[in-house]
Structure formats: structure tokens, C-alpha cells
Amino acid sequence: MEKSVSAAYTTSPALLNPKPFSPKTPNCYQSYSTNRRRSSLSVIASSSFKPHTLSSNWDVPTASAPAWMPKFEELDTTNMLLRQRIVFLGSQVDDMSADFIISQLLFLDAEDEKKDIKLFINSPGGSVTAGMGIYDAMKLCKADISTICVGLAASMGAFLLACGTKGKRFCMPNSKVMIHQPLGKAGGNATDMSIRIREMVYHKVKVNKILSKVSGTPYEKVEADTDRDYFMNAWEAKAYGLVDAVIDDGKPGLVAPIADSNPPPKTRVWDLWKIEGSRKALKNMPSEDNLLQNGHVGGQEGEDELKKEEPASA
């Protein structure tokens, strides 16, 4: 009891911040401190002489600690995806991103080598050596690595997409895939330039051989196609052998409406396929609602109707 009274007395605001003494009011200081001590004694007496702190909500009725606080790792989407064995490559392929992807692949493979690892790719490409490091880590893992293209998989991104486990390489319906030869610069004296050029040619041949092996496309065709930027849509990438299936393939509600029931032909200009022509031909393009009602059937009948139309002026 004495300890509690002394604690309340020493923590009194009147003693911490005493009022200046005035001769006109000689008893003001004494009455103020006496009232504060009495109120402190009443608080202690009503609490059954139990010690109180701010953490136990003493004299702070609005301060209440939550019953559950999420951990820091639970707020990180990367860790949340990693728990589902999902690795996401959503940036350029450089040394930093490659180290991050490699560490995640090795961790998931060591955790359970019998469960698949899903690698989502949305990357414009980047360093060839960094991409080769990820490729070697993928081949080192005993677990199957399923690759899924979302958005764009270009250059080394397309290379990693094609290097997934056979039969488990997928592409979203509106994604793009692009392959080309390695890019680089050579400067300095003639000897240094020849060394750099020889290294670039080595990487070009190496990448083309691996692409030919994983896709089943002849090496000569891969070499010719990668001479310049070669863009493909999801179905073209499937026909090329870079992926095994298109996710939600055959559901027109998930893709842009097209004027034919067959997948688009192998062409580099997918966005302009069946769109070129006169303005009147563009107006006669079937809408998405008509495609859904007709079971996505069109083609020859629609082309015959367009032939009967009079040519529109430019």
C-alpha cells in the first residue's frame, strides 16, 4: 500500500510541473497537490492494489491491442506465392533477378522434389549469361518446372519459357512471344572486337541449338527466324513448339474475336490478321456476341458475303 501511494505521489503532474507560488493565493499550490494525491489514491484503491501499466490499458480506455497481427512475411506477395510453389519473373533478366530466381528454384526443389514448380514469365529479356544461369538451375532441379507466359516473353524470356518441362509449358491467350539473336556491342582495338564478336556468335549458336532441341524445329529454320525479331501469338508459339498448350484455348470469350474458327496462320503480323481491307469490310466483321451465339463458326460463308458486297471507296 505504501509503495503504491508513493508511486502515485511521485508521478503526480503537480509535482512534475509545479505551479509558481503567488502571495495572493497562498493555498493554491497546496490544495491542487492535495486533490491530485486524493484522486491518485482513489484510482489505486479501486483497482485492488494491482500494478498497472500502459500496456495493460491503465487509464487509457481507447488503447486496445489487436488480437492478431500479421507477420511481415505474410504481407509479402512474393513469399505468399513461394508457399504455393510459384516463382514469378516479371522484370528484365539481369544478374540480380537471376540470382533471386535461382535461389527460389533451388529452395523449392530442396523442399519437395516431387511437386511441380510453376514459373510465371512476363519479361522483355535481358542478359544472355544471366538467362543461361537460370536455365542451368532449371535443369539442375529434380522437380518438374512448369512455365507459363503472361503478357510478354521476349528474347531470354522466350528462351526460358521454351526450356520448361516438356508437356508443362503454357501460354495465356493474349500473350506474346518473341525470339531473336543475341544483341551486343564491340569496341576497342581489332583484337578486342574480334573476341567480343566471337563470343556473341558462340551465344547465338548455343541459344539456337537449345531452342531447336526443345521446340523440335529444325536448326536452319530457327536460325533464319531469329535473324530478326520474330513475334508470335499464343497459337503460333504452340505451333512453333515453344509451348505445349494455350490456357483456355477454344473459349472465344477470353480472347479477341476473330473471323475464322481455325487458329490464326503462322504469321508475324497477328494483330493485322483478317483486319486488312476496306472500311466496309471492317464494318462487316462479326461481333463477339455473334461469335458466341453461332458457336464461333465462320470463315467461308462470311468471305462469300463480303465478295458480293460492292467495293467501297477509299
Image (cartoon, rainbow, N blue to C red):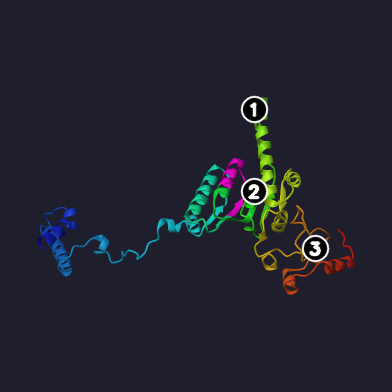
Q: Residue 123: within the magenta?
A: yes
Q: Left or right: where does residue 108 sit relative to residue 26? A: right
Q: CA distance from mark 1 to mark 3?
A: 55 Å
Query: Disc 3 vs disc 2: Cβ atoms closer than 8 Å?
Result: no
* In the image, residue 47 above or below residue 150: below
Q: Classify mark 2: helix, strand or loop.
A: helix
Whether residue 92 is visible to the viewer of this picture, yes or no, is no
Q: Which mark is residue 192?
A: 1
- Kind of residue indicated by mark 3: Leu
Q: Which region is colored magenta?
A: 120-136
- Closest to the camera, between mark 3 and mark 2, is 2
Mark positioned earlier in the residue sequence (3 or 2):
2
Q: Quadrant of the C terminus?
A: bottom right
User: Which class describes the residues within 10 Å of circle 3: few (<14), some (14-19), or many (20+)?
Assistant: few
- Kind of residue indicated by mark 1: Asp
- Picture residue at 69% right of the left edge, 42% below the top: 181
Q: CA distance from mark 1 to mark 2?
A: 28 Å
Q: Left or right: where does residue 160 sit relative to residue 56? A: right
Mark positioned earlier in the residue sequence (1 or 2):
2
* In the image, residue 225 above or below residue 173: above
Residue at the disc numbered 3: 282
Q: Quadrant of residue 94?
A: top right
- Closest to the camera, between mark 1 and mark 3, is 1
Residue at the disc numbered 2: 159
Q: Position of residue 14 (x, y in %)?
A: 17, 57
Q: Classify mark 3: helix, strand or loop.
A: helix
Whether residue 44 is visible to the viewer of this picture, yes or no, is yes
- Picture residue at 75% right of the left edge, 64% below the top: 258
Q: Quadrant of residue 145?
A: bottom right
